[in-house]
Image (cartoon, rainbow, N blue to C red):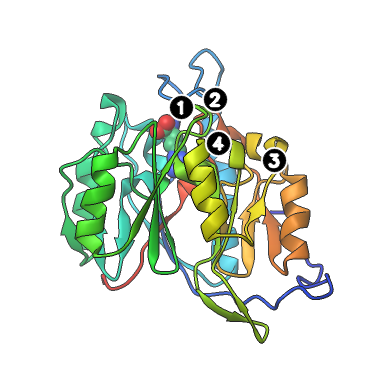
Amino acid sequence: MTQNTAPAAEAANAPTRTAHHRRYLMCRPEHFTVSYTINPWMEPANPTDTAVAMRQWQDLHDTYRSLGHEIELIDPIEGLPDMVYTANGGFLIDGIAYGPKFRFAERAGEAAPFIDWFRAAGFDTREPVEVNEGEGDFLLVGEVILAGTGFRSTGDSHREIGEVFGREVVSLTLSDPRFYHLDTALAVLDPVEGIANGGPERANIAYLPSAFDERSQAVLAERYPDAIHVSDEDGAVFGLNSASDGRNVIISPRAKGFEKQLRDRGYNPILVDLSELLLGGGGIKCCTLELRGAGS
Ligand code: ARG
């Protein structure tokens, strides 16, 4: 881990950010490899190194722990190499777990183990009817669920998740196949809507405008006028596939411009390299599922 020790709020006028406790579900990449292609990053002919994946993953795990976050683990299963990307395993708020239904047969076998894990952990678990890939395509911002479609989760799952949680769902359409899950194109920096540093500040997000169709870009611009727009360059290295606790934002060391944008806004970027897991088309956020609310 390249821990950045510089003061977070170097920039004048940058609001003071508050770190919030997080509980995450992760899965060791013991069986990680790229043996099929279901996104443009996956090329089975390129060799993968499971030991490197394990080391990089451990680094992410230890970074969360050092920030005081709680990590739960789900056992990896042989033959399910993408299980390390736990973000796709479900979506949880207030102790309710909405299970996944994967788009491709290659990942279908992951759904039952995730659903079983939520039940065993004491979550009120709901099995989906519609195809959805969990927190890969659903992100909670304030009271609202931003929902991605275009490549994986269907529009019908947006309706279903709205019914499960009784919340407003804002549908966004992804249009660039490299950014096939919402969490590859948009990052929630501070999910709390409220007051920062004495002044009102809207819930804060960062996103890659060019990953969305025109309608969705207009929706985002209207709802989040203060959002950070990242460059295509930073987007292309999965800079947005990051995890924030409201203050500390774990990002790829390659996303140089985003790192600076975060610092200018008072966040504390922490660089963790998951280059090996990028061979499967995933990064920091993909390996992280937030467990919100009860469950024991
Ligand atoms: N190989 C996986 C897939 O294509 C990567 C999943 C990345 N996960 C994410 N939350 N973006 O399904």
Asked whether the beta carbons under mark 1 and mark 2 sit within 8 Å of each other, the answer is yes
Give the residue number, with chain letter if any, for mark 2: 48
Q: Tag 3: residue type? A: Asp
Q: Quadrant of residue 55?
A: top right
Q: Earlier in the sequence, mark 4 or mark 1?
A: 1
Q: Tag 4: residue type? A: Ala
Give the residue number, with chain letter if any, for mark 3: 234
The answer to which of 283 and 18 lies nearer the viewer is 18
Q: Tag 2: residue type? A: Thr
Q: State the residue at coordinates (78%, 63%).
A: 264
Residue 144 in view: yes
- Between marks 4 and 1, how big is the CA–CA gap? 27 Å
The image shows residue 47 at horizontal and vertical percentages of: 56, 19
Q: Nearer the viewer, mark 2 or mark 3?
A: 3
Q: Earlier in the sequence, mark 4 or mark 3?
A: 4
Q: Nearer the viewer, mark 3 or mark 1?
A: 3
**SS assignment at label 3:** helix
Q: Nearer the viewer, mark 2 or mark 4?
A: 4
Q: Which image quarter holds the N terminus?
A: bottom right
Q: Earlier in the sequence, mark 2 or mark 3?
A: 2
Give the residue number, with chain letter if any, for mark 1: 33
Asked if residue 270 is positioned above or below residue 102 in the image, the reply reads below
Q: Nearer the viewer, mark 4 or mark 1?
A: 4
Asked whether the beta carbons under mark 2 and mark 4 sit within 8 Å of each other, the answer is no
Give the residue number, with chain letter if any, for mark 4: 211
- Between marks 4 and 3, how big is the CA–CA gap? 12 Å
Q: How many marks?
A: 4
